[in-house]
Amino acid sequence: MNNKFPILYTFRRCPYAIRARLAIKISQTQLELREVVLADKPESMLEVSPKGMVPVLVLQNGTVIDESKDIMHWALKQNDPENWLSKDDDIIAETDALITLNDNEFKRHLDHYKYADRFPEHPMEYYRQRGEAFLQQLEARLSQHPFLLGDAVSMTDMAILPFIRQFAFVDKPWFDQAPYPHLQSWLENLLASELFNQVMIKHLQWKEGDDVTLF
């Protein structure tokens, strides 16, 4: 590799890519952004990460990081001005447990809920109720303090945020009247933040030979 900046292959609406971009943006780490169309993935991305899933980060030395949590950690270790990463072992373990629950059990229920027509074994409401167990857990936390782990935003909030956003927008009228006032407020405030809006700016599909788009 002989790039001036790290390269991030991303897709605007992918929740994994969103959380990677959030950590990169808050870390003020400059890189080249390459917006991917999932039906037309660039060969250069598939060469470095054959599984073909975003996000993919390619460092100048050729190192490839293609797990979103690992990209978040990489970015925040470059610079963590808002102290998203904790040095407390108990909080680190709590973070890992919550994100693992989000990425596995909750994500499975979210996919069934969002694409219920692909899973006709049960109605949409069944899958939503399964996902609500996680919403209830988050609501309980947010009833005690404004963010998931305390009084300040952390990596945990930003790693989970894009998935709660996706769940909420499957049926926004339902979500807005659901008994989760603290979760609703948390989501609304984070989605309205300058940081979130910066990482959701639309970019054209990247193609070989395009000018560099810095992020």
Image (tube, rainbow, N blue to C red):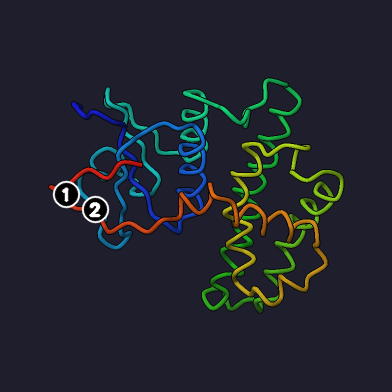
Count of number-bearing discs: 2
Left or right: where does residue 88 sit relative to residue 17? Answer: right
Q: Quadrant of residue 205?
A: bottom left
Between 58 and 80, the one nearer to me in the picture: 80
The outermost residue toward the right is 144
Q: Of residues 185 and 109, which is closer to you in this image? A: 185
- Badge 1 crowding class, 10 Å Cα cut-off, few under 14, some 14 to 19, many 20 or more, is few
Instruction: Please name the residue that numbered disc 2 is placed on.
Output: 206
Residue 51 spot, x, y in % from top left: 35, 46
Give the image location of residue 133, x and y in percent: 77, 58
Q: Residue at x 56, y 63 (%)?
A: 111
Q: Residues within 10 Å of mark 2 (few under 14, many from 20)?
A: some
Residue 123 in the image: above or below residue 94: below
Query: Which residue does the image show at 34% across and 31% down from the upper left?
Result: 64
Hey, what amino acid is under mark 1?
A: Asp
Residue extending farthest front: 194
Q: Is 182 above or below relative to 122? A: above
The percent position of residue 198, horizontal first and vertical second, equals 46, 50
Residue drawn 53% across and 46% down? 195
The amino acid beneath tag 2 is Trp
Residue at 21% in and 29% down: 3
Q: Is residue 4 above or below residue 12?
A: above
Quadrant position of residue 49: top left
Residue topped by disc 1? 210
Residue 108: x percent and y percent?
Answer: 60, 58
* Circles 2 and 1: CB atoms closer than 8 Å: yes
**SS category of the residue bearing label 2:** loop
User: Is 28 on the left or on the right of 46, as rendered?
Assistant: right
